[in-house]
Image (tube, rainbow, N blue to C red):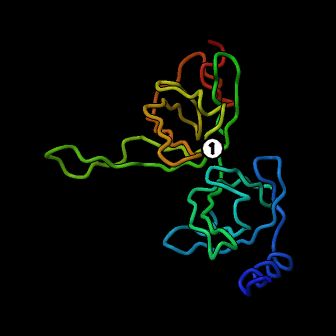
Amino acid sequence: MLNPLEYQFTNTLKNYGYDVIVNGLDQVRILLKEYEEGTSTTEYKYMLFRNRLIKQGDIINIFDDNWIVLHEDISINDVYTKVIIRRLKFSINFNFMGDVQSIPSAIDEGTYRLDEGQYLTLPEGRIILHMQENDVSKQIANTQRFLIMGNSWKVVQKTNTEHGLYKIYADIDIFNDNDDKENEIADRWK
């Protein structure tokens, strides 16, 4: 016998849900809810779906936009799962010894740092990329360069403390003669 929450969720999903593509392969029906916790609702949303169909780090194609599952919440009464998703607004070209791979990413700008005995400093020209952990993103190495937003950047750290996700920390760098600024590919002719 179906419990009342499962019955309600199944009907709501059937009548008001959206079909999306997960990691370019699987079609899953989901519900979307606005995310209103001090951030832009155009960049973050809640997504609800049947348990175990989607996991942290998955890329979801919703209405021709790519979104990444940032945080997994616990299962609600073993009926559905609620997660936070973020829009992947940028596609960054990484050059792996002549093999250029485009990786969808979200970017946070302007980190702040406190040095011992100093006041809060202004942004230092650092960005943080959020991307799916996969075979391509695993190749990204410290000191690797990339171009985005009209600037050159150099990777200074890569972490995967959250399963399925990479955070790439990069500092502003200088352009060189081998950079393809028009197509945003670092070291294109190296």
Q: In this view, does 11 lie to the left or right of 110?
A: right
Name the one closer to the observer, 158 or 94: 158
Where residue 180 sits, quadrant-wise, is top right
| 161 vs 30: above or below | above
Q: Residue at x 70, y 20 (%)?
A: 99
Three-letter code, disc 1 = Gln
Residue where numbered disc 1 is placed: 132
Tell me: 126 left or right of 115. Answer: right
Above or below, 96 against 27 in this view is: above
**In the rendered image, which quarter contains the N terminus?**
bottom right
Which residue is painted at 76% across and 47% down in the image? 23
Looking at the rendered structure, the secondary structure element under dot 1 is: strand
Q: Which of 121 and 12 is in front in this view?
A: 12
What x and y, as percent, mark residue 57?
A: 62, 49
Percent from the top left, x then y, of residue 7? 79, 83
Kindly indicate the quadrant of the structure image that contains residue 31.
bottom right
The x, y position of residue 154, in whole percent, is 48, 29
Q: Is residue 188 depicted above or below 168 in this figure? A: above
Which residue appears at 66% of the width and 32% of the height?
Answer: 135
